[in-house]
Amino acid sequence: MFRDQHGLEMTAASEQAVARYDRMMLHYLGIRSDTGDRLKEVFDADPELLMAHCAKGNFMKLFCTPPLERKAEESLAAAKQLMAVGATEREKRHVAALDAWCRSDIIGATDIWEAILLDHPTDVLAMRLAHFTHFYLGDSAAMRDSVARSLPYWHAELPGYGFVLGLNAFGLEETGNYADAERAGRRAVEINAQDIWATHAVAHVMEMQGRHRDGIAWLDGLSANWDGCNNFRYHAWWHKCLFHLELGQVDVILGLYDTEVRADTGSADYLDMSNAIALLWRLEEVGVDVGGRWVELADKAEDKIHDHIFAFHDAHYMMALAADNRRKAISAMLESLEGAAAAEDTTEGPVFRDVGKPLCQAVAAFGDGEYDRVVALLRPVRRQVFRIGGSHAQRDLFFRMLTAAALRSDQHRFARALLAERNALNPNSPWGLEREAQALDELGEAAAAEDARQRAAALMAG
């Protein structure tokens, strides 16, 4: 029995194996591209290190792709065999959490990680995994509170302290505490400028506050540190594009799309695809010709129409199919969604039923120009969209779709009401003000429309 870098007991063959596990965990927290290599080094030192098998199984689940789901189950089987020989109570709980996740019981897995954290608040694997699943369950408050409960047990001398601050920053941002979120995120970046999660948490603050030029400067000043990061760096570039989009800098966005956001056109990773899909849709909504960029995304989306791992992913895949008019694939995906929505023994089943299915139907209808139908589908569920997970910035895509559909179906009073809600929260969004002006023009409120238009122009001019 040994102890890891956070003082937790670990069943292992040697101190070397534990040291390598510790190193691997810091690379995982740092979202480093070589985390897999560090995990291989752990297995080289101790092929039977139970926590390494648990980590591998969870990593496979995080990829959210069916072939790797099977590898997660293989890791679970290995962990169960090792647990039968001997394990600590904490290690047994980690096996139970992975077991629950492999059975698509995401809530059950999250509850086990939270139970681990009550007894072992420095268990960063449990903390990071719970952070992820709270995020994809759409529970921002739980994501915030999960870290807050453990934070008193952390201090600057503990390895990974800065990463924990970064997790704290994102939870605070998603629950609207922007000042404390920015403070925690900046402190994390001071500790480690390569902390891309904390960097992105501060970018979220600036996005929500409409601080577009601050956001561009923040990300430009730190982007040189992202070379060692995994594909999450493409998401950071996506955030930069959102700032440029509000400022109308289309040429910059298209350049960043080709060289950074979609630098790896071979990737079918859900985050890489959702970044690209969401950005292209936003560009087209403001009238930009994106050329043939939809084709490769629609090709990859066709391969995923039966995955149904998270509703958030499916809504984006449907968007690519609709944008490239893949009629057969759209019909097949909508039919396949019926099965996902009927599943009662998975955490996501009710989400697909209540939100994911109408959301995908609305996306398909928007592609067909059936804007009245889009509004009819999205209006009843618009306050439930948080259940698909993702951030406020990511889910804003579907708010924009509802708004665009309302404007295009002559439902201007409803569009005006939607924009009043959004602009009250973020009065520095040129997109929101321009759409408000459009709705007001149609309602005959010319003076108010001109005022909104002038405010948008002033923001874009700086």
Image (cartoon, rainbow, N blue to C red):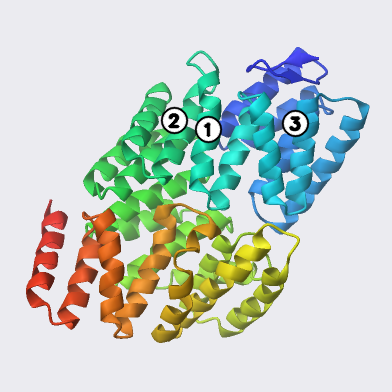
Q: Are marks 2 and 3 in contact (CB under 8 Å)?
A: no
Rendered image quadrant of residue 424: bottom left
Residue 356, placed above or below residue 30: below
Q: Which mark is residue 52?
A: 3
Rendered image quadrant of residue 442: bottom left
In the depicted view, which residue is nearer to us: 231 or 95? 95
- Helix, strand or loop for disc 1: helix
User: Separation of disc 3 and disc 1 at Cα?
Assistant: 23 Å
Q: Residue 147 carries which label?
A: 1
Q: Using residue 285 as the reference point, say whether residue 357 is left or right of it.
A: right
The residue depicted at 44 percent of the width and 68 percent of the height is 293
At label 1, the amino acid type is Val
At label 2, the amino acid type is Gln
> Mark 1 or mark 2, which has the lower sequence index?
1
Question: To which residue does mark 2 refer?
Answer: 194
In the depicted view, which residue is nearer to us: 160 or 196? 160
Q: How crowded is mark 3: few (under 14 residues within 10 Å), some or many (20 or more)?
A: many
At label 3, the amino acid type is Ala
